Image (cartoon, helix red, strand yellow):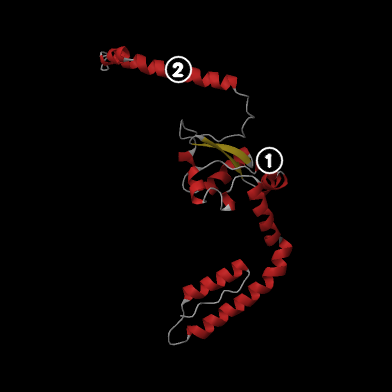
Amino acid sequence: MEDLKNFIATINWTDPNLILGTVAAVTAVGVASHLLTNSSSPKALPLAPSPRGRLPILGHVLVIGTSPHTKFTEWSKELGPVFSLKMGAQHWIILNSAKPVRDLLDIRGSNYSGRHNNPILSMLSRDGEMYGFAMNGDFLRKWRRLTNNTISKSKLQANYNHMFNSESRAYLATLLREGGGPEGLDIDNATYLYTVSIARCNIVEPIKI
């Protein structure tokens, strides 16, 4: 090991030919490693068509612009409702119409329920305790079943219609009653209570201090 260190110390790293040779050697090793890895791994299914403008490393990041939905609509007219993008090191599959969304995420949802392992989302969701960001498994299936039983169309019609009407009347009455009072109306508090009551399908009473 000491002999190797001494040898490296004697190398003239300012020599252009040496630098060029080193870069070429590193590139050759990288290409060979990539080819060997691809040849030994099973062939993946082909991706959906991809738009022009893909850059090395960055992919399509710079061509999406500030209005991705507008760009996605433009690309869908050229490529169809399902297409792929390269966003940095990741491949994205874009579903840009209702039919593929229903076909893939609803009818065949069990095939596509997995989530990418994102360390930031994992920290923000307390390792998936916020089930909207949980990985596919028993925990997510249990909470999805509870959610679907609560917000299905029949449940919404049975539980929310009368609550929405009664809370809306109460909210308007509060605006009328307190809006003309000497202390005025705390619009933020009134709107917050109204919104939370509707969201929870429950009446939230203000705390009197």
Q: Nearer the viewer, residue 130 or 38?
A: 130
Is label 1 in contact with label 2 (beta carbons under 8 Å)? no
Q: Is residue 23 above or below residue 97?
A: above
The residue that appears at 48% across and 74% down in the rendered structure is 189
- Residue 23 left/right relative to 147: left
Residue at the image position 68 percent from the left and 57 percent from the top? 146
Q: Name the residue under label 2.
A: 29
Q: In which quarter of the image is residue 198?
A: bottom right
**In the current view of this chain or complex, which residue is farthest to the front?**
2
Q: What residue type is labelled 1?
A: Asn
In the image, 125: left or right of 146?
A: left
Mark 1 or mark 2, which has the lower sequence index?
A: 2
Give the x, y percent position of residue 87.
50, 38
Give left or right: position of 149 versus 178: right
Residue 91 tag number: none
The amino acid pointed to by label 2 is Val
Percent across and percent down for residue 138 are 66, 47
Q: Is residue 18 left or right of residue 77?
A: left
Tag 2 secondary structure? helix
Label 1's element?
A: helix
The numbered dot on residue 111 is 1
Is 140 in front, or is 70? Answer: 140
Q: Residue at x 67, y 69 (%)?
A: 160
Q: How crowded is mark 2: few (under 14 residues within 10 Å), some or many (20 or more)?
A: few
Q: In x, y percent, where is residue 61?
A: 47, 39
